[in-house]
Image (cartoon, rainbow, N blue to C red):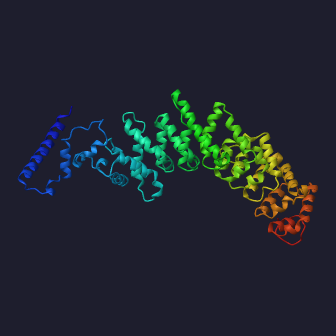
Amino acid sequence: MLVLREENELLRAERDIALQKIQQLTAMLANCVVTPAQIAPTRSQFNSLDLLLPPYHQNEDPRQSATLPPHLYQTSNPFPSTAILDPLTAVDLILKGKVDYVRMNKRSDFEVVNSLVSTISQEQFNLNMPPKGLKEATITLGKFLGQPKSPLYTQYMVKIITEAAKSLCLTSNGNYLCQQLLEKCNSEDKLSFIKQIEKDMFAIANDMFGVHVLVKAVGIKELEVASVQVCADSQAHIVAAMVSYGIYESLQTGARKVWRPYLSKCRAAGETEIFEKIKGDMTGHWADLAVSSQHGTISVQQMFEGCATQDILEDLCRVATNEFGHYLIKRFLGLEPMFHAAIFTGPMFNALCNAILTSYPPLATNYYGVRFVETVIDSNRILQRPNAIKYLNSLCSQKDGRIPAIVEVANSSVGRGHLQFVLRHMPRHGDGGLMGRVRSTCRQFQTTLRNSQSGNELLRRLGLINTPSRRF
């Protein structure tokens, strides 16, 4: 072995000191004048004794080292080796940062790895667990996956990760290990992993950590031609699990993150079967999906705008005034900073604007609906007055014997300011026919309108009651 002169001299001095100490201990034992406590070497002596050890062979069985005397494991590394420790003790030291698991080598007992993976799979149930040591150990385990130089060790890790697949997917560090397996291991290991979690696919897809594992699985790109079928089988297992649980149920949860990359690949490949299946199952349910949850409205926005348009327009009031559904209408109107109304010009945009102005029940009963109506009225300076006239005619309509929408709007918490905005677009002395219709409608339902402050002020503004008040 080539070493520098200075290092060679230093090694010779250390070896001489170690040999001298061994000779002294041998003489003391021969004369029987030593106690067991005197025989125990100190940490500094461990460092000297370690120089006498033969170099570790790379092909040595990891379990064989467990039979060696404990002092032979002490090296200049200040951290103890996991190979001389009980598996649970070793894991405890790893979590406390007393074992540098980043330097782990093949001497580490397989049982330590087993205990560590078990601990990672249960981390969310132990709030007092130190995260740093566990994260470093997880990263180190992930590096060993897919290494051809240690097939036995890798096979053992793949086996225990696959066996604990579901619980690992549901933890912050465990889902990283699962993703590393899907990224680095061969196709057969990937398919075995997918089959292991097949029955729990929806629960994993709906978990904040587990969904990342399934997105990784759906996005696998195999390089070998022989592996393409295995990759397709993995995706088929995932999609089949989503369909069996229910397309609607999966789209309104975190599982929609799994659908998006899969549908993008199908669209690029020209596969239409899955799209026809979704359209058939979801007809009449798009509005329900849009108002069900944040995931539901995002699903409609990202993937199915064209399919959902008719359902949304037919149930516009419920969608536009909903805490989740209103995001969809904001996007259609170009109110989001990342979108522009110019994208939706044409028949789609015009149909939406007309539906907002003529909707029954009316939209302008909460903040979301008021914003949409006023946006449409002001969307075009030329059409401001025509839009306001169309809107007032719709508010006064009693088609099919229904109660005029103006009554519901006036009695709502936002009615006063909104009606003030609409009437400002009407001329004071012109269009007497429309204003006459408004007065006639309000006179007919004035008993109901008097039940709210905004309704009373509307009646005063129209001259239907003479009680002095501030101007409407």
Q: In the rendered picture of this protein, how many numbered marks are placed on residues?
A: 0
Residue situated furthest bottom in the rendering:
467
Q: Is residue 231 above or below residue 200?
A: above
Between 3 and 174, the one lying in front of the other is 174
User: Could one spot residue 457 in this view of the protein?
Assistant: yes
Location of residue 57 (image quadrant): top left
Q: Is residue 405 above or below residue 254?
A: below
Q: Is residue 71 left or right of residue 379?
A: left
Instruction: Give me the residue at 82% from left, 49% from top.
Output: 384
Residue 62 locus on image (x, y percent): 31, 41
Between 227 and 308, the one lying in front of the other is 227
Instruction: Give me the residue at 42% from left, 36% from top.
Output: 146
Residue 442 locus on image (x, y percent): 89, 63
Between 472 and 153, the one lying in front of the other is 153
Q: Is residue 130 left or right of residue 48?
A: right
Between 264 and 190, the one lying in front of the other is 190
Quarter occupied by the C terminus: bottom right
Residue 176 locus on image (x, y percent): 47, 45
Q: Is residue 342 left or right of residue 75?
A: right
Residue situated furthest top in the rendering:
225
Residue 426 locus on image (x, y percent): 86, 55
Q: Is residue 198 left or right of residue 382?
A: left
User: Could one spot residue 75 in this view of the protein?
Assistant: no
Quarter occupied by the N terminus: top left
